[in-house]
Structure formats: C-alpha cells, structure tokens
Image (cartoon, rainbow, N blue to C red):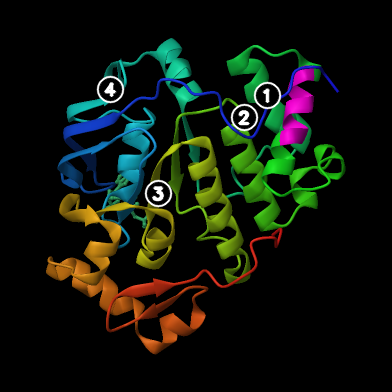
Amino acid sequence: MSERSYPADPVPRLASTLSVDGVSKRYRQRGKGRKLTVAVDNVSFTIPPGAAVGLVGASGSGKSTIGRLVTGTERPDSGHIRFGDLQIERLGHRSLHTLHRKVQMVFQDPYGALNPVHTVGYTVSRPCVNYLGMSASEAFDRAGQLLDRVGLTPSGQFLSKLPHQLSGGQRQRVVIARALACEPEFLVADEPVSMLDVSLRAGILRLLADLQRENGLSLLYITHDLLSARVLTDHILVLNKGIIVEQGATVEVLRHPRDPYTVKLLDALVTPELAKNRPLQVHADAGEVIGPTEDSSIVG
Ligand SMILES: Nc1ncnc2c1ncn2[C@@H]1O[C@H](COP(=O)(O)OP(=O)(O)OP(=O)(O)O)[C@@H](O)[C@H]1O
C-alpha cells in the first residue's frame, strides 16, 4: 500500500455552480434534406454545488442532448453553459480536460462504456494518473479503495478482472468508480440503471445517492423514471419536446404536478403493469414514493 490515503470524507473544497442559460440545439434529420429536429429549445436552469437535480421526460424529449451539452461533448447552437469559471461551449480540447476533471459522466450502457481489453484495475486507476498526476502504483492503490467504496469487495478480486468477467451491475459499479476516481465535483448520470436487470437497479441507485451525499457531489440525474428521480433528487426539471415545462422540489412536483405532461408521466407510472415491474412503489393518491425495496448490499 502507498502511504497516501484517501478518506471517505472529502477534503472541503470550493465547488462550482452549473448555469445553463437559453440553450438550444438542433439536429439535421437524416435523409430529410434541410429539415431540422429541435432537440433542446431555449432551456435555462442552475444547479448549485451539492444539489441533486433530476431531468425527466419521455423518450426523445432532449434529456441526453442536455447531458452531452453540459459535459462539453457537444456544443449548443445558441445559449451559454457555465461551470464555475469555465464557459463550456467555448472550451477547446485542453480545457475540456480541465472540465472533465471536475465533471464526470455515467451512461446507461455499462457494456459499451468499458474497454474490453483493459482490466478493472487499469480502467479505474487511469483517471488518477491522467487527472490527479499519481504514479501508477499510487493509482492502483486508489483504484482498490474506490472499488471497495462502490461495493466491489474484496477489491483485490476485482482489480485483475476484465469486463466480460463481470455482471452488468458490477460493470456499472466499475463505471461509477472510474467516474469518482478524479474526485469530480459534478456527476451527470444518464439513465444509469435502465439497461440493468430490475433486481439490480435499487442497489445502484442507492449507491449513487450515498456517494452524492457523502462526497458533496452535484448530480444531474437523467431519467424517464419519475420514481427513481424521487429517490435520488431534491429538485426536478420536466422536459417535453426540448422545453422545460415544469420544475420545482421533487416531492412537490410529484405530489402536485401542474403541467399536463407531468401528470401524463405520473399516470403512466401507476398503471398496474408498470407498477408491478418496478423496484419502487408509489401511492397513486398522494404521489408518495416508497422504496427502493431491495437490499443495497446486493452487488450486481
Ligand atoms: N446526433 C443526432 N442526430 C440527429 N438527431 C438527434 C441526434 N441526437 C438526438 N437527436 C434527436 O433529438 C431529439 C432528442 O434526443 P435525445 O436523445 O436528447 O432525447 P432523450 O430524451 O434523451 O431520449 P431517450 O430517453 O430515448 O434517450 C430526438 O428527436 C432525437 O432523435
């Protein structure tokens, strides 16, 4: 073990606010000449340090596009996105590296997210080398600590494994450990459980909730699932056809939805078929959500 240790409690640091101001993004429709799809339409919101915000909407409402815009993966056609002193839409390659030290992403596909030829230890230790300037052996020790933290214990058994030797839930835990490796301030999680078996989802959601709280992370949780947003977030943005149609405290929006689109999303949740298949339960009358129900110690 190296002498350097990384306590679970983070060292207090200056954290940044994410400000999205009047952002729009259009895409050319394939095979349709000059026709454009408006994916995001004049969207504005702010996420202060340490806040957990849900971005919810049906398929095609523009959620993932916003995820890509705030992580600098794509540029908006208009509007401004600022994280602390970084003006994201103007960042060049080098400054994106600085951004990604602070803002990390977890996507829905834990299969595609991991390089199949790299061991878990290599994958999780790389950001410690690239972003924190650790030596390879320091980074490997840190990778072990991160694996312990995300529930892949004993970590020694996982460090040398390749992605194909892991279950879907375990892979997503590796992806989360890698995202945490450079000690980010902000996590964008885009449908992080939608490709996992239903029985594993609650464990991953609870892990994200714990990490967000313990590390003081800001979180943008992108999902079509209002119930999981209830578990993970304090504030919610409801997106319909690229427009934020409603926002507010998550509990309030779910209890007293004002926009007809939010009502429709909630109605869709309480149909018997959907309710039966979900790891979370909802009281249809009050919009009160109970759950998740599984044991968080489950390692998927
Ligand atoms: N690269 C692209 N090229 C063309 N159109 C795109 C592209 N990315 C997104 N779109 C379109 O923009 C709209 C918003 O897509 P986006 O993926 O952001 O929605 P979403 O809410 O994340 O949907 P889902 O939940 O299905 O992932 C959709 O109509 C989509 O077809």
The amino acid type found where label 4 is placed reads Glu
Q: Residue 89, labelled with which disc?
A: 4
Q: CA distance from mark 1 to mark 3?
A: 25 Å
Q: Which residues are magenta?
A: 138-145
Q: Is residue 166 left or right of residue 130?
A: right
Q: Nearer the viewer, mark 4 or mark 2?
A: 2
Q: Is residue 120 above or below residue 261?
A: above
Question: Which numbered tag is attached to residue 126?
Answer: 1
* Separation (CA) of disc 1 from disc 2: 8 Å
CB contact under 8 Å: marks 1 and 4? no
Identify the element where label 4 is drawn: helix
| Crowding at mark 2 (Cα within 10 Å: few <14, some 14-19, many 20+) | many
The foreground one among 232 and 70 is 232
147 lies left or right of 22: right
Label whose residue precedes the other's in the sequence (2 or 3): 2
Q: Is residue 106 visible?
A: yes
Q: Residue at x 50, y 28 (%)?
A: 184
Contact, mark 1 vs mark 2 (Cβ under 8 Å): yes
Is residue 108 visible in this depiction of the protein?
no
Q: Which quadrant is home to the C terminus?
A: bottom right
Q: What residue is rendered at 16% in x and 45% in y?
A: 35
In terms of sequence position, does the residue under pointer 4 or pointer 2 come before the other?
4
In the image, what residue type sits under mark 3?
A: Tyr
Give amino acid for label 2. Ala
Which residue corresponds to mark 3?
Answer: 221
